[in-house]
Amino acid sequence: MNPVTVIGGGAAGMMAALSAAQAGARVVLLEPNEKLGRKLYITGKGRCNLTNDTTAQGVLDHVPRNSRFLYSAVTRFPPQEVMGYFEALGVPLKTERGGRVFPRSDQAADVIDALFFALKRAGVQRRQARALALEVRGEEVTGVVTREGCLPAAGVITATGGLSYPATGSTGDGYRLAQSVGHSIVEPRACLVPLEEAGESCARMQGLSLRNVSLTVKNQKKKVLFREQGELLFTHFGLSGPLVLSASAHIDWRKDRCTALIDLKPALEEAKLEERVLRDIAAAPNKAFHNLLEGLLPRLMVPVMVERVEVPADLPVNSLTRGQRRRLVETMKGFVIPLAGPRPVKEAIITAGGVKTGEVDPKTMASKKVRGLYFAGEVLDVDAYTGGFNLQIAWCTGRLAGESAALYWKERGT
């Protein structure tokens, strides 16, 4: 009997193939890259933040769009079971700040190797090939077309990822395949991505990393879209770092024009910060303004702050007016960066958009348009914030698609 064919050897695809095989189906896994799981190698800075130690509802709370669609998948394979699954595959885990779960070894390769050997043990056949088209007869998928010809299939799972990091194989093939058989695609866009500045301040501070600052993003109507404390990085194009990637998931650039405000001293209220400035002035009343700033801020920020506050760099601090002190305090509590937009989608950690969830059965991940066709992972219009939630989505949708496809395969064989 023809196999279940899984298109894509990333997190969702490997889980789908393994789940289908463990449920008794014959499985072929198509992946054009020489190695499986290439994108997994770079997740979590090479450490692989494979899930978050929370409840199923905790996962759904971190999914800004289409969270209800994921209810069945997440509740059937929640984080605790995912953690147990990988521990059983021989990957000891640890939990860090924010519930982030990593291999105890801090090596993404350990996760990939565990899946690779589990696939071999389960009898999954690996083929290094790219899916060019789906063969559909009578509203039922019957094969996958590659350069070598059409591979007959009794069920197909599309787990091709999105458009981010195309060097790893995420080139949008899944969108094209789904669209070719009648599925609607919600326009893919960058998510969890650095942000470009509409100006040059960030470039002047390139390489400066700030910890324990607060980032607020507001749209053109002054509505707060995001506010959180953490770490960010100034780059040649704008802003990056964990805070910024998280903020990007809350912005819809199709309708919003945004400004970032950085509170450089979130632990101090404005009045307390002003008291601190006055104490520093009293301690050395004749020192230059730029020297005062060097005691308050990282050195790379000083020339930019001098311009923002519009005070001569060499002005003795005992000559500062009350208005100038107020401007300094207000600027430190709300350092403004006008935003021009996100970096290109190829630089994003994940892609928002994808196969429209209304056209997929959430209880099986099956297409509502083509029998025997299933979807898993980032190719779907689902995405989450940082913290291991996107890989959790890959694992649970892959598991559900694999088990559902195996059931379909068995029914076809009877």
Image (cartoon, grey):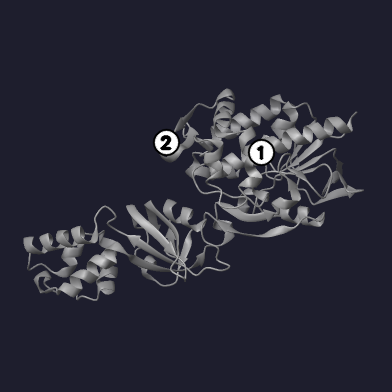
SS for dot 1 = helix
Residue 210 visible within the image? no
Judge whether 274 appears above or below 41 on screen.
Answer: below
Say which residue appears at 26% left-offset and 52% top-offset: 267
Look at mark 2 in the image and give the residue it sits on. Answer: 96
Query: Can you give x and y, in whole percent of width and height, for residue 397 in the image?
Result: 66, 40
Sort mark 2 into few (<14), some (14-19) or many (20+) by Cα contacts within 10 Å. few
Check whether the beta carbons of the residues at disc 2 and disc 1 lie within 8 A of each other.
no
306 to the left or right of 374: left
Q: Which is more foreground, mark 2 or mark 1?
A: 1
Point 40% across, 39% down: residue: 97
Q: Is 53 situated left or right of 75 in this image? A: left
Which numbered disc covers residue 331?
Answer: none
- Judge from the rendering whether residue 230 lies leftward or rightward of residue 187; answer left or right: left
Q: CA distance from mark 2 to mark 1?
A: 27 Å
**Where residue 137 sits: x, y (%)?**
91, 48
In this rendering, the answer to whether 196 lies above or below 383 is: below
Q: Which residue is mark 1?
A: 72
Residue 92: percent from left, percent from top: 50, 26
